[in-house]
Amino acid sequence: MAQTEDLKKLCAQVRRDIVRMVHAVSSGHPGGSLGCVEYLVALYGSIMKYDPRNFTMDGKNEDLFFLSNGHISPVFYSVLAHNGFFPVEELRTFRKLNSRLQGHPTTHENLPGVRIASGSLGQGMSVAIGAALAKKLNKDASIVYSLHGDGELQEGQIWEAAMYAAGNKVDNLISTVDYNGRQIDGDVDKVLPLGNLRAKFEAFGWTVIDNPKGNDLEAVTSSLQEAKTLSGKGKPVMILMHTEMGAGVDFMMGTHKWHGSAPNDEQLKKALDQLPVTLGDY
């Protein structure tokens, strides 16, 4: 397991990767990617057990992660690369023709670390439940993790999956909602209010952890560790992780406008001036 200071350095470098990747091709989703840096760095750096050098699609005896809100692929790719799934230099190919690093993760590209094609919102929890049930059938004690956007919870399939997971005691599943309050068209409360998410998931039969500091590495790590202690107790676990879209880059914060917009040359320089080089740019 990496030390906290090393993981903090990785967070800074991943943020540089994100803004450079989307700038290079003038396309991508930097806002949510920047907001989920601490979560993915903590998950792959100190929580999950896995073998990046011997990646298999079934992941037997390994913890599994499913990215449901696949549009935040820049942060996913960067974290996978820095954790040894493929060369960091391959990040240069993001969204380019014939690249394995497509705008939304795909499986036919055979990119290590990616087990489902995602981006069609609402589907990731269902897949994660299937993987978790398979582990139970195989007497595999590993845990399945999934990440979702708050705007994604406007999809009905999420709630069918949530009902199924609790009803069938899928207690080796730990899901997290990136609760930043914004989606592509504006504030979530203005597009379609979600109400009291804690009360909703608890009513559906989940154990819920509320993390108000989703961009604090220690707080994110602590909430994931707590979730692990609650697994295996008859209920799936949901972490409501309150983050800031665009975290780390001041002009990308406090707005939904960077959900799917790439910075121009001047904006890239402004962003990079706020993000220190800690591990070296690809």
Image (spheres, rainbow, N blue to C red):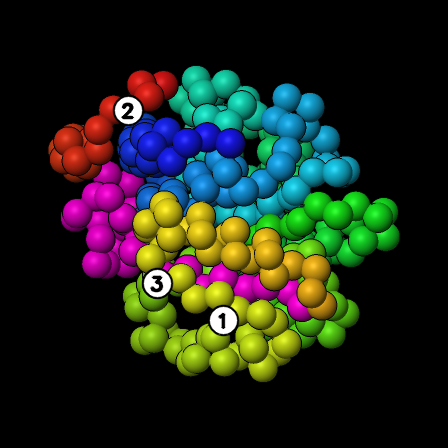
Distance from Cα at disc 2 to Cα at disc 3: 27 Å
Assign the C terminus to one quadrant of the image: top left
Q: What secondary structure do most residues of the magenta stretch adopt?
A: loop
Compared to 265, does 207 lie above or below?
below
Q: How many numbered discs? A: 3
Q: Which residue is mark 1?
A: 154
How far from the left and from the top, in percent, is residue 252? 22, 49
Q: Which residue is mark 3?
A: 212
Q: Residue at x 54, y 42 (%)?
A: 47
Q: Residue at x 21, y 58 (%)?
A: 254
Q: Of helix, strand and loop, which one carries label 3? A: loop
Which comes before the other along the chain, label 2 or label 1?
1
Q: Of helix, strand and loop, which one carries label 2? A: loop
Q: Which residue is mark 2?
A: 278
Asked if residue 55 shows in the view, the reply is yes
Is residue 236 inside the magenta stretch?
yes
Q: Residue at x 32, y 76 (%)?
A: 190
How far from the left and from the top, in percent, is residue 7? 38, 34
Closer to the camera: disc 3 or disc 1?
3
Q: Which amino acid type is shown beneath numbered disc 2?
A: Thr
Q: Which amino acid type is shown beneath numbered disc 1?
A: Gln
Compared to 46, does 146 lie above or below?
below
Query: Which quadrant of the structure image shows residue 91?
Result: top left
Q: Which amino acid type is shown beneath numbered disc 3?
A: Pro
Which comes before the other along the chain, label 3 or label 1?
1
Q: Which residues are magenta?
A: 235-263
Q: Nearer the viewer, residue 208 or 126?
A: 208
Asked if residue 22 shows in the view, the reply is no
198 lies left or right of 62: left
